[in-house]
Amino acid sequence: MAKSLGIFVTTTDCLQHVIGITKAAKAKGSNVKVFFTWKATHLSKDPQFAGLCELADDVSICVDSYAKQGYDIEDVPEGLTAKKMATQAQHGIMIEDFDCYLSL
């Protein structure tokens, strides 16, 4: 079975790193899950965000953080579905179920 990588994103200056790490992990056959929280929810408005959603196996954002950053929770970012507007339980899943974990 391929390794799995969970990427926990909290900052706004790392989208290029997240994309690069995701590409590298996918090239090695890894399952990649990315979870955006707090200030990092602003990255969901970056034009490259939808491409990351296609590249990674699973991308979700903390809906509570999204709202606290001033966004309407009904305004689902391009590349996501309403179901991917999630809770911090997604973070817990990465910690528990993924082989490797990275926090940016």
Image (tube, rainbow, N blue to C red):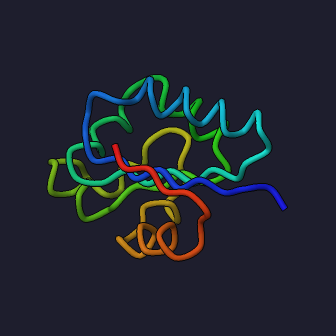
Quarter occupied by the N terminus: bottom right
**Measuring 15% from the left and 56% from the top, which residue is drawn there?**
68
Quarter occupied by the C terminus: top left
Tell me where residue 20 appears, x and y as whole percent: 55, 26
In the rendered structure, the answer to whether residue 38 lies left or right of residue 91 reads left
Tell me where residue 47 appears, x and y as whole percent: 45, 23
**Measuring 44% from the left and 54% from the top, which residue is drawn there?**
35
Q: How many marks on residues?
A: 0
Residue 52 vs residue 25, the one in the foreground: 25
Asked if 78 appears above or below 95 in the picture, the reply is above
Q: Kindly indicate the quadrant of the structure image that contains residue 14.
A: top left
Tell me where residue 66 appears, x and y as whole percent: 26, 53
Asked if 28 appears above or below 14 in the picture, the reply is below
Tell me where residue 60 appears, x and y as whole percent: 48, 56
Residue 8 vs residue 99, the one in the foreground: 99
**Measuring 58% from the left and 41% from the top, which residue is drawn there?**
53
**Measuring 20% from the left and 44% from the top, which residue is drawn there?**
39
In the rendered structure, the answer to whether residue 59 lies left or right of residue 61 reads right
Asked if 85 appears above or below 38 in the picture, the reply is below
In the rendered structure, the answer to whether residue 28 lies left or right of residue 80 reads right
Residue 51 vs residue 2, the one in the foreground: 2
Asked if 61 appears above or below 44 in the picture, the reply is below
